[in-house]
Amino acid sequence: MPRETGRKLVAQNKKARHDYQLGDTYEAGLVLTGTEVKTLRLGRATLTEAYVSVDDHGEVWLINAHIPEYEFGTWRNHSARRTRKLLLNKREIAKLSRALSDSGRTAVPLSLYFKDGYAKVEIAVATGKKDWDKRHDLAERDAKREAERALASRNRYRR
C-alpha cells in the first residue's frame, strides 16, 4: 500500500483563534498509541479545552485534548483525556519555554492533522483577549464583509 502524502485535517480549535491573540506557531509530533491513531484517522478529536505545558525536564505535553476511545478497541484501549507527549527539537523547546515564562502567555493547540502519514499538532504561543478586543474583531470582520459585498454588487452592475 502506498504511503499517505499531503495534509489531512482531523480537528481544529476555532475557539483559540477567537479567545487569544496568537504569536509564534510551532509544528510538533505526537506520541500516540495504536488505538489513538485509529480514532484520529476516523476524524474524531476535540481540542477546545486543551493546552500545552513545558515541564522542568524540558519535555512538552499536550494536556486535556479529547481523543475518544476507539470503538472497536479491546482492553488495551486508551483513556480519552490522557496527557500526550509532544515532539519538538531542543531549540524549539527552549524558545517555547522562554515565551511561556512571560506572564499572561500560554500555549494552545490550533489544529491536529496528519502530514505525510504522521500525526502532528500545530501549537501557538498566545495572550488572552479582553471582551472589548473580541467585540472589536467581530465589528472589524463585519465591516470588511460589508465593504466586499458593496464592491461586488457595484462591479456586478457596471458591466
Image (spheres, grey):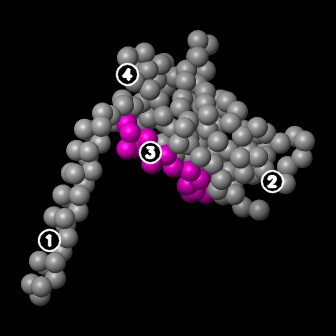
Q: Earlier in the sequence, mark 3 or mark 1?
A: 3
Separation (CA) of disc 4 from disc 2: 39 Å
Q: Earlier in the sequence, mark 3 or mark 2?
A: 3
Identify residue for label 4.
104
Q: Are marks 3 and 1 in contact (CB under 8 Å)?
A: no
Horizontal relation, residue 144 to residue 57: left or right: left
Separation (CA) of disc 3 from disc 1: 30 Å
Q: Earlier in the sequence, mark 4 or mark 1?
A: 4
| Residue under the point 20% across and 58% down | 144
Give the mark toward the camera: 1 or 2.
Answer: 2
**Is 132 or 91 nearer to us in this picture?**
132
User: Of helix, strand and loop, which one carries label 2?
Assistant: loop
| Figure check: 43 above or below 22 | below
User: Of helix, strand and loop, which one carries label 3?
Assistant: helix
Residue type marked 4: Gly
Q: Earlier in the sequence, mark 3 or mark 4?
A: 3
Separation (CA) of disc 3 from disc 4: 18 Å
| Residue under the point 67% across and 30% down | 83
Label drawn at residue 79: none
Q: Are marks 4 and 1 in contact (CB under 8 Å)?
A: no
Label drawn at residue 15: 3
Residue type marked 1: Leu
- Which image quarter is the C terminus in? bottom left
Label drawn at residue 151: 1
User: Of helix, strand and loop, which one carries label 4?
Assistant: loop
Residue 120, x across and y down, in percent? 59, 43
Task: Based on the picture, tell me whether residue 25 belongs to the magenta stretch.
Answer: no
Residue type marked 2: Glu
User: Of helix, strand and loop, which one carries label 1?
Assistant: helix
Label drawn at residue 71: 2
| Figure check: 98 above or below 137 | above
What is the magenta range?
5-20
